[in-house]
Amino acid sequence: MSNLSYMEKLLDGVEVEWSILGDENFVEIANSGRKPVKSSLRVPGNIPYYGANNIQDYVDGYTHDGEYVLVAEDGSASLERYSIQYTTDRFWANNHVHVVRGKLGLNTRYLYHYLSTVNFIPFLTGGVRAKLTKGNMIEIPIPIPCPDNPKKSLSIQAEIVRILDTFTELTAELTAELVARKQQYTYYREQLLTFEKDKVEWIELGNLAENLDSKRKPITSGLRESGDIPYYGASGIVDYVKDYIFDGDYLLVSEDGANLIARNTPIAFSISGKNWVNNHAHVLKFETYAERRYIEYYLNSIDLTPYISGAAQPKLNQKNLNSIKVPNPTFKEKERIVAILDKFEALTTSLTEGLPLEIALRQQQYEYYRELLLSFPKLEGEA
């Protein structure tokens, strides 16, 4: 029997009672135990200290002990994907999360999965800083299958949890694998791109690449004609336009912006095909794929602070970019390095292959089955 037909059979004819989070027969709200502590006053330990979106610290001591769902009171990172956390064992909760759990008749893990489907926006107050008050939270509807048969109800809830946890556990395993592979990638990149000064030729970047900055042309957003050709800025695509000024394979390097210091995204990135580049990214052309990718990997692995000017607005001007000294091994060695790092990059960052794709697919599966399993008949009058 397929998963789909099995789940349809599981839920076939099941009656649902719509309760609310404020129903004390099903839900315990344990907010009274919360206690915010300033970071400077926290005693270090091994107990997780929870905020609105994640674990903020590890402390000595705890406010709660057991299985709970943490719902952001304020400060959720996303209104569309409202912050819902699940925890077991001892933990410390500050005053930015509501602390709830199921009583007899309501599986807490089931409650977690269901709340992950809820649109919280109608229950929020405030403007810039949205807030989910306790008064509004307790009005959130929750479905209880087979309300007249608690044993069967808990059995259905447990089976729904088992199915959904299969996907979340697989995603967690893949995510852990991705973290390990990224660490491995960073290690090998450092090993492959570290050269002794007297063992290899060092040459200025300006002697290895053709700089095409003079051909760049910025266009203000109001004057861009929409199309399907990528329009690049310092950190990637910022728009799509109708025309192009470059056609081929190039390496773009951030010219200005906070990311030169923060390095939240790569400051060097390869592009191919027809494109338009504004004046916030340098345009470098190389004779071969291996040379372009080698320089891309190298620039993303080194500290560029000595070449960056400006404080409020960091800038890597063309003169300083051209003066960057890079190790220049043989072409064959560059090809070897690039081949190894390309495999790691595909495994750890590609959205079309490797682990990120697997994680995205598993998440889509989880969300599909979650909607299927938790889409109970709506309340009367609800759209």
Image: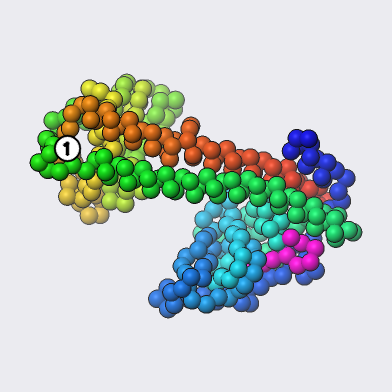
| Image vertical order of residue 119 relative to residue 221, above or below | below
47 is within the stretch colored magenta: no
- Quarter of the figure with the N terminus: top right
Q: Is residue 62 left or right of residue 279?
A: right
Q: Is residue 27 left or right of residue 227?
A: right
Observer-nearest of 231 and 301: 301
Single out the residue that lies furthest toward the left. Answer: 198
Which type of secondary structure does the marked residue at label 1 adopt?
strand
* Quadrant in the rendering for residue 43: bottom left
- Can residue 252 be seen here? The reply is no
Q: Is residue 143 left or right of residue 179?
A: right
Q: Position of residue 362 (x, y in %)?
A: 59, 41
Q: Position of residue 226 (x, y in %)?
A: 44, 27
* Quadrant in the rendering for residue 52: bottom right
* Quadrant in the rendering for residue 19: bottom right
| Image vertical order of residue 308 relative to residue 70, above or below | above
Crowding near pointer 1: few (<14 within 10 Å), some, many (20+)? some
Q: Position of residue 325 (x, y in %)?
A: 14, 40
- Can residue 289 be seen here? The reply is yes
Residue under the point 9% across and 41% down: 198
| Image vertical order of residue 294 relative to residue 124, above or below | above
Query: What residue sits right under mark 1 in the picture?
Result: 327
The amino acid type, in three-letter code, at marker 1 is: Pro
Q: How many marks?
A: 1
Q: Position of residue 142 (x, y in %)?
A: 75, 57
Q: Which residues are magenta?
A: 99-107
Residue under the point 60% across and 68% down: 89
106 is within the stretch colored magenta: yes
